[in-house]
Image (cartoon, rainbow, N blue to C red):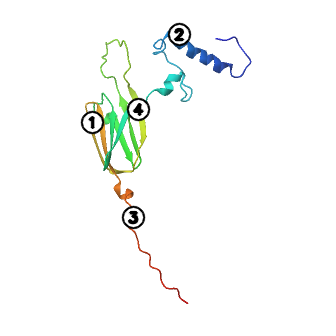
Amino acid sequence: MSPKSNHPFEFLNQLQELGDMRKWLGPDFLKNMPMPNFQGVPFFQDEATAAPFPPIDLYNRSSEIVAVIALPGLKSQGDVALTVRPRLLRVRGQLSSYFAGAHDHVLSSELFRGAFDREIDLPERVNPDGVKAVYRSGLLIVYMAKDLARETPGNTVAIEFAPEEG
């Protein structure tokens, strides 16, 4: 670290030096150490590029939007909640440990566990009443019927011009 300075932004320079230390020691050296998170700002730059969880694929079909959500390890309906609004899909829940027993010593841990909450803006309006969800092989598949009534143009109305009085 640099010697003490009166420059108001010196602390930020010192934080950058910690990030450089990670390059020297290797990417896994600080992996399991708790690092501060200043109100949502990642401590190291590559944390900002981490993919949101759970990963979601969206498919646009002729009459529906399909979301495929990777959620390995769900055991019951109580593990996950799904909310659909006309332009929004929200999935939230809790994933517990997939495998580890009480006496297991974990050597490496990269699988997500814990609470999750993700919202996805939908590309088209869907009918929240026309939703079907199926969980199979670690994937939550959500079929959302498009709100076609809102997408179709209204009827053309002929305008009658009345003769002017006078």
Q: Is residue 1 above or below residue 84?
A: above
In the image, residue 128 lies at what x, y percent? 35, 50
Taking the image as shown, residue 76 lies to the left or right of residue 94, namely left
Q: Quadrant of the N terminus?
A: top right
Residue under circle 4? 116
On the rendered structure, is 129 left or right of 44?
Answer: left
Mark 1, residues whose alpha carbon is within 10 Å: few (<14), some, or many (≥20)? some
Marks 3 and 2, how far apart at CA: 64 Å
- Spatial CA distance of label 3 from label 4 is 41 Å
Q: In the image, what residue occupies the spot 42% across and 35% down?
A: 117
Please report the residue visible at 50 percent of the width from the left and 27 percent of the height from the top: 48
Asked if labels 2 and 1 touch by Cβ distance under 8 angstroms, the answer is no
Instruction: Give the quarter of the figure containing the C terminus.
Output: bottom right
Give me the disc on residue 154: 3
Mark 2 — residue? Answer: 24
Amino acid at the residue labelled 4? Phe
Q: Rounded to the nearest whole Å, what is the CA distance between mark 1 and mark 4?
A: 17 Å
- The numbered dot on residue 135 is 1
Front-most of residues 4 and 68: 68
Q: Secondary structure at mark 1?
A: strand
Residue 34 horizontal/vertical position (percent):
49, 18
Distance (Cα) linking label 1 and label 2: 44 Å
Label 3 secondary element: loop
Amino acid bearing label 2: Trp
Per the rendering, the mark at residue 11 is none
